[in-house]
Image (cartoon, rainbow, N blue to C red):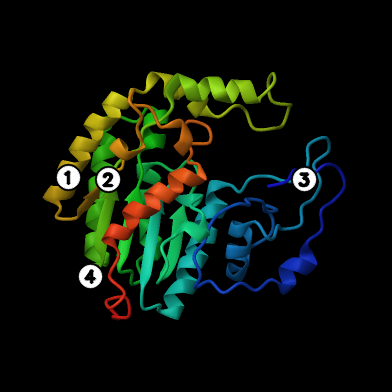
Amino acid sequence: MPGVVGGVLILATLLLTQRVNLTGSSQVNASTIESSKRVDPAQVKALRDGVAQLPMEPTPGFGLRRELTYEQWVTLLKNEAAAIAQKHPDSLHILAGDSLSLWFPSELLPSGGTWLNQGISGETSYGLLRRVKLFDRNQPQTIFVMIGINDLIRGVRDETLLANQREIIRHLKTNHPKATIVVQSILPHGGDRASRRYWASVKGDPAVGQNPHPLWVKRLPIISNRHIRKLNQRLSTIAKEEKVQFLDLHHLFADEQGYLHDSLTTDGLHLSYEGYALWRSQLERFLPQPSQATVSH
């Protein structure tokens, strides 16, 4: 998303005319909002697809944009889920998770249905557990859950992470008994290679008032991909015990050394277009066939 240098960016007119149909799939390429303003649900997809931004008050010395707060994202996704629920699409699929789900390119999501993206950057298993109820009113055919890497980055205990995963699964089973629930493995990461790539892309410390260097830059080198594989084995066991599907993506994304493959990532943590294309090929395995897609709940 292009940077904004100086002046005040005014896109109010665009936002008043940009009424996007929420039955389409969604991708987040823009994350700006004036904290005192409320976002109309119809603007969500425009914000996600990067075709609109909310007008911002200038901050002296620092650009015009601020990232959405966690609470603002929760409100935004709650409104989007409610809007989709009112439309009752015949074939609905949900992505639930963190930034990996959040940034899934809309053009790469499998066709033939409506996609509701419920990802938030930096999300943890506890955060997802608290907000998974926001789409209780939706009637999806498939729910894909990927969560956990931010727990590891923040030092959350394995037992806590796995217990939260189990509770997420149980909530989804109770409230979406007809849905196919797919628990996805935690992906590998680039380790110290990711950190080196990040430091090579920045110069010095962030300016006063700007976001500090992300926590994952320091944490990834000490999080073993071998440990993540063991966690995924335990997660697979939980999925089996809870009688839901498990999608093991880890081995597909790992290189010979066990790191996230360079061609599949932009920075050692987040995925490249090629990475999402690979992910898409695996999502398709769990989606209903075209003859089944029109069956209502």
Question: Where in the figure is residue 86, as x and y percent of width and height?
Answer: 45, 78
Q: Give neighbour class at mark 1: few <14, some 14-19, many 20+ (Cα, 10 Å).
A: some
Q: Which amino acid does the dot numbered 1 rest on? A: Ile
Which disc is residue 238 wearing? Answer: 1
Q: Residue at x 52, y 22 (%)?
A: 195
Q: Earlier in the sequence, mark 2 or mark 4?
A: 2
Q: Nearer the viewer, residue 72 or 169?
A: 169
Badge 2 vs badge 4, beta-carbon distance below 8 Å: no
Q: Are marks 3 and 4 in contact (CB under 8 Å)?
A: no
Cβ–Cβ under 8 Å for marks 1 and 2:
yes
Q: Earlier in the sequence, mark 1 or mark 4?
A: 4
* Nearest-to-viewer mark from 2 and 4: 4
> Which residue has dot 4 on it?
178
Residue 250, label in figure: none
Q: Height in image: 208 above or below 50?
A: above
Write down the residue under mark 3. 64
Q: Which residue is mark 2?
A: 165
Residue in the image at 63% along x and 63% along y: 46
- How packed is label 2: few (under 14 Cα within 10 Å), some, or many (20 or more)? many
Say if 207 sits above or below 171 in the image. above
Q: Secondary structure at mark 3?
A: loop
Which secondary structure lies at badge 1?
helix
Marks 3 and 1 sit apart, C-alpha to C-alpha, by: 45 Å
Residue sitting nearer the eye, 176 or 1: 1
Ranked by sequence position, the earlier of labels 3 and 2 is: 3
